[in-house]
Image: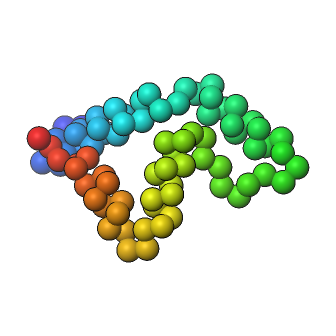
Amino acid sequence: MDALGPYAPALRAYLDRTRGAFAGAQSPAAAADVIVGALTEDAPAFRVQTSEQARGFVGVKLADVDGSAIQSLVGGWISAD
């Protein structure tokens, strides 16, 4: 991380915030169950979200034609404060 120089604090803050946001969202086993289920369906969906949190985030992202909603949602994740 030190090799990033002045960007290290911002990246560290972003990674910490992202880990915290998604840490309790779903266990690996629960995600695997959804994936295995999709792989064994006769006609699986083209895209599969493995949790309600993922569905909500993707819903915002897909409806966001200019990127402003996602920028507002995650913009504070980069702050090094």
**Up-down: is 62 above or below 20?**
below
Image-quadrant location for residue 28:
top right
Place of residue 27 in the rendered image (x, y in percent of width and height, measured from the top left): 55, 26
Query: What residue is shown at x 29% (from left), y 38% (from top)?
Result: 17
Return the residue nearer the eye: 62 or 8. Answer: 62
Place of residue 64 in the rendered image (x, y in percent of width and height, measured from the top left): 43, 68
Which residue is at the far right? 42
Which residue is at the far bottom? 66
Using residue 39 as the reference point, say whether residue 57 is left or right of it: left
Image-quadrant location for residue 33:
top right
Query: What residue is shown at x 36% (from left), y 36% (from top)?
Result: 21
Query: What residue is shown at x 46% (from left), y 61% (from top)?
Result: 61
Place of residue 18 in the rendered image (x, y in percent of width and height, measured from the top left): 34, 40
Place of residue 70 in the rendered image (x, y in percent of width and height, measured from the top left): 36, 60
Return the residue nearer the eye: 11 or 48. Answer: 48
Image-quadrant location for residue 71:
bottom left
Q: Quadrant of the N terminus?
A: top left
**Up-down: is 7 above or below 13?**
below
Query: What residue is shown at x 12% (from left), y 48% (from top)?
Result: 6
Return the residue nearer the eye: 60 or 15. Answer: 60
Residue 46 can be seen in this image = yes
Residue 5 can be seen in this image = no
